[in-house]
């Protein structure tokens, strides 16, 4: 997905996924000035009542371009925007929409109220004028049922957790397409800033059993198989868990742990070293507390 930084235009390019479904692929990289923070996949669905978006991108500029693209593809305005979780590369583009258009689970809404505004300073520092005018909107449509039908398209809404404290996956019944949010990454290393690995594994088990034909991950290319990306995501988080536990037992400090060998099966995975080093910062303190004896503890 090309980004023209000088003009602060994202140049969003849709990829056809299935009948009435497109995805705008994010850059398989960190949030950088050069990509305008557009690193997350965003899905557009056509319905008789209007376009449905799953996630909104990182900025008002992105959300505005996304609105125009959805109208061009479907011939209709945006009817609904579902947010899959709290991370700003997925949410801050909701500044282009009104709260009644934006949907979230009760758990996600609570997280966005408490933590969402805190991302603002970091996003503005990283992206500068890409973020001009961006202000996170809290969803006004509370997801209260296991499915919703919009314009004849029935979407199963799965309130899960693991990548974050509140993850939403969406299953399109008509095309048997799973829109997994950041519960699933594909050929791009998973990020873990709010991860709970046991809950993540449980959610992956749920996603694997839905009967989908294809998976749209939160990051990385579309998986045209039922669960290869799901299996790859689980393999990575299992490896991270084991590798960092072993690193602590071997006496490695965090810098050394961030330089351990990455298994050959992950050699083609984008951002692998970057996300390994981030995961060290996320998990090492807790793993050390659980794994190492406390010296000098008073009786």
Image: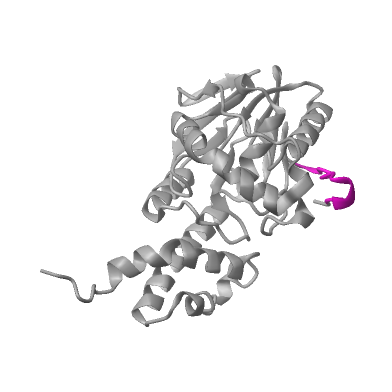
In the rendered view, would you say 98 is above or below 135? above
What is the count of numbered marks?
0
User: Overall secondary structure of the magenta stretch?
Assistant: loop
Residue placed furthest toward the right: 7
**Residue 276 percent location from the top left of the image:** 53, 68
Left or right, residue 285 beside residue 41: left
Q: Residue at x 54, y 78 (%)?
A: 259
Could you say which quadrant of the image residue 270 lies in? bottom right
Which quarter shows the C terminus?
A: bottom left
Residue 212 shows up from this direction: no
Residue 47's x, y, as percent? 69, 22
Q: Is residue 14 magenta?
A: yes
Q: Is residue 287 visible?
A: yes
Give the residues drawn in magenta, as a range: 3-15
Relative to 259, say whether 117 is above or below. above
Which residue is more in the foreground, 244 or 199? 244
Q: Residue at x 65, y 69 (%)?
A: 268
Residue found 42% across the figure and 81% down from its top: 252
Q: How is the image coloured?
A: one colour
Q: Does residue 37 lie above or below 83 as drawn? A: below
Foreground: 51 or 97? 97
């Amino acid at each position: 997905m090309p980004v023209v930084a000088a003009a602060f235009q994202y140049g969003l390019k849709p990829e056809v996924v299935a009948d009435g479904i497109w995805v705008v692929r994010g850059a398989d990289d960190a949030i950088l000035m050069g990509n305008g923070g557009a690193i997350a996949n965003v899905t557009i669905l056509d319905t008789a009542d209007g376009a449905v978006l799953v996630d909104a991108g990182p900025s008002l500029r992105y959300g505005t371009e996304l609105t125009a693209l959805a109208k061009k593809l479907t011939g209709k305005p945006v009817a609904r925007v579902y947010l899959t979780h709290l991370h700003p590369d997925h949410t801050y583009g909701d500044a282009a929409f009104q709260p009644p258009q934006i949907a979230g689970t009760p758990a996600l809404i609570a997280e966005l109220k408490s933590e969402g505004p805190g991302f603002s300073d970091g996003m503005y520092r990283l992206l500068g004028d890409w973020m001009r005018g961006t202000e996170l909107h809290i969803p006004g449509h509370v997801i209260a049922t296991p499915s919703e039908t919009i314009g004849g398209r029935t979407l199963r809404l799965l309130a899960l957790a693991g990548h974050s404290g509140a993850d939403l996956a969406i299953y399109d019944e008509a095309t048997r397409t799973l829109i997994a949010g950041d519960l699933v990454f594909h050929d791009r290393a998973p990020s873990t800033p709010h991860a709970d690995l046991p809950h993540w594994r449980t959610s992956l088990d749920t996603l694997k059993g839905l009967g989908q034909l294809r998976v749209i991950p939160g990051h990385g290319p579309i998986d045209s198989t039922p669960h290869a990306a799901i299996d790859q995501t689980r393999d990575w988080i299992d490896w991270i868990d084991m590798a960092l536990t072993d690193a602590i037992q071997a006496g490695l400090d965090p810098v050394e742990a961030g330089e351990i060998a990455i298994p050959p099966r992950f050699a083609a995975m984008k951002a692998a070293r970057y996300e390994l080093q981030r995961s060290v910062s996320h998990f090492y303190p807790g793993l050390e507390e659980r794994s190492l004896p406390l010296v000098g503890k008073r009786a």
